[in-house]
Amino acid sequence: MSPARVTPQRNPLRDERDKRLPRIAGPCGIVMFGVTGDLARRKLMPAIYDLANRGLLPPGFSLVGFARRDWATQDFGDIVHDAVKAGARTPFREEVWKSLAEGFRFVPGSFDDDAAFDELARVVKELDEHRGTGGNHAFYLSIPPGFFGLVCEQLQRSGLAGGPSDSWRRVIIEKPFGHDLASAQELNKIVEGVFPADSVFRIDHYLGKETVQNLLALRFANSMFEPVWNRNYIDHVQITMAEDIGIGGRAGYYDGIGAARDVIQNHLLQLLALTAMEEPVSFEAHHLRAEKEKVLSSVRLPKDLGSATARGQYAEGWQGAEQVVGYLQEEGVKAGSTTETYAAVRLDVANARWAGVPFYLRTGKRLGKRVTEIALVFKTAPHLPFNDTATEELGQNAIVIRVQPDEGVTLRFGAKVPGATMEVRDVTMDFGYGRAFTETSPEAYERLILDVLLGDPPLFPRHEEVELSWQILDPIEKHWAGMKGGLDQYPAGTWGPAEADKLMRRDGREWRFP
Amino acid sequence: MIVDLPDTTTTELSKRLVKIRSEVGAMALSRVLTLVVVVDDVEAEEAITIANEASRQHPCRIIVIVQGETRGRARLDGQIRVGGDAGASEVVVARLVGRVVAHADSIVTPLLLADSPIVVWWPRHAPKAPAKDPIGSMAQRRITDSVYLAKNPRTALRRLADAYAAGDTDLAWGRITRWRGLLAAALDQAPYESVESAVVVGAPDSPSADLLAAWLHARLKCPVRLRRSKESSGVIAVELTRASGVLELHRPVNGNAATLSTPGQPDRTIALAHRSDAECLAEELRRLDPDDVYQEALTVGLAGVGTARS
């Protein structure tokens, strides 16, 4: 008997039938910029701990923090510790924490400080030598995009952008990917000037959510949905992302950007692409992207942008039990700002599947509640063998994919009201993700960070998709910029400006009440 | 909420279940499977606790068959637990006494969920041939725990190997998933050399050690030896010998962290805690198709593993 051969392509201990074996990343570390930021503490650090706790990080995994703080590694560890205690999804285990914390390092410095980056390079090298990270490092740029150029340059200058030949360096960036097509291309030039396209991972955390991935399973693993997933049965599609919070302390970022750039350009257009795309050849990254790009490039804007778009700003009002100020009164917002906090657009997808089926996208802050959903609203039945009074309360059938909260799928259809008379009313059939499966489905960031470390790209948009999205949004932004006067105001805690309702009514439709 | 139904019938139990469901409303709306637990009186509560914990990940109906004295008048004492007393599931406890003990399958049949998979778990003693057992034969998946099947793990595993049918699985196999994951991940890295021989160090009362060695033998096709450590120390270490040296994954007795040593590279530590039964059970419930890799280790690999005393 001769021993089984081991090659880079063939590991005898792996077997595709072995579904228990977890996908553990190879030796590697993460270098995080912006460790003092909100995202890092609320999401990234807890996600890294949860990954460690689930046993998915490699032995010797290391986390290097970089920030302009006078900290020692110990202080950095304390910050991570607090963040993990506050935000981790899985129980805190001392032994996991201990082995994770051994890999913490902190490098103080600012982005223009050459010496700090040289020190960072030294620390990374030291990790390779002493903890066996094998030269594999991911740089997480949890910083404003204005600094991407500087940091990328520094990474290149200090030799961090490239490692030994059999190792990898990857860079992770968060939205916003620019504020229009030109700036997105500019940004891309900077990042891809230093890192090859395959090494750039753009995080759209929506794509890491279980429900969004379930959309693919729902559509392509079942035979009961796809046959009706087209213009023959669907009347229109509504994609909603509503937030109940205001801009909080983020006026500096938000003012001048607005709801459309902040949400529609990335999250909602990605959801549209996944909802509308054709079946990919496989779930490999290039096949998935090909379909997404195809559908994004067939999106058409209506001719009259004035009647097909709506925007507004929240005014003061009552949000639940709390009285809140309007956008213009928020601290840090410029007087007379025309930044929208609500945006709704009607898009058409010019292909055989969707011709004549409008996609309505809306997003806003300080709306009725926090909810994200994709709703496919069906045409009414061609003939109803009932009299009008019997179906008076019957609305249109719908399939609703609830992305958050309470992830799941709702089917809405008519059913007879019990009793002697024939009366049909809307009822819903619910699938709750959390009820049918694990109570603790992984956070989006866990999945995405693990995918970066494994080098598994399907869930990350490429710059082509980013640019296609800007091509869709740019004309709308231009149209809005050319409009005179202030914005429609809507009271906080309601479902947006009257203009948005008019947009729907012009088409003889109504917004769903999510 | 716990509802006791002494000296009852399955018809009564089913009726009560439906009634509670409509009264309480939102309990375990989408149950994905039925988990049948067959235990003795003494272990019943512990088994229910473990099953409840595992059910948090897989909402299910849990039917607990508690086997009592086999003589005397046949009697069924039922109990329904829902809400806070049942994790994410609904639990039906059926205590059997008398001749009905031998016909437990007749109790299970009417209580099964419609159109969903059935899993049987024997927390302690399992039938000689799980798939031929009346309840076992109803199930897609049969979970044993070889730790309790015989004093000598090899005897227990041989028994399971002889009776193996697609869908059989063992908690001792789930206990080494993380070990297997780390070893597989280690071979994903350079140098890409064949493993010439391997050693597993584990306790003489640990079937997990035997299964780990069996798996390595079946996959690596190289000589694998099992070196026995002290009683109840679990799996201690795995050594893979390659041309460039020995790759070792080592976890000290009662330790929660392991060290991975590879020639020419710094030692790396990683948390590697012992897995609880609930975690292992939850893993079993995740996949309901036959575990071919377990089969291969059990029925092919095991026979080729040599043992040595140290």
Image: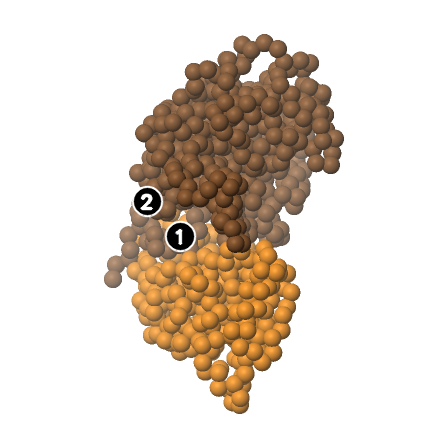
Q: Observer-nearest residue: B61 or B203?
A: B61
Q: Chain of mark 2?
A: A
SS of the residue at dot 1?
helix
Residue of label 1: B184
Q: Is residue B241 visible?
A: yes
- Residue at x-position 53% and y-position 60%: B55
| Residue at image point 56% right, 45% down | A406
Q: Which mark is residue B75?
A: none
Q: Colour of chain B?
A: orange
Where is the C terminus of chain A found, in terms of image quarters?
top right
> Can you give x and y, in whole percent of width and height, for residue A290 in the image?
34, 31
Element at label 2: loop
Chain A tint in image: brown
Q: Residues within 10 Å of mark 2 (few under 14, many from 20)?
A: few
Where residue A307 appears, as percent x and y from the top left, is 50, 18
Q: Which residue is mark 2?
A: A8
Q: Image quarter for residue A500?
A: top right
- Kind of residue at badge 2: Pro
**Against A310, is A102 above or below?**
below
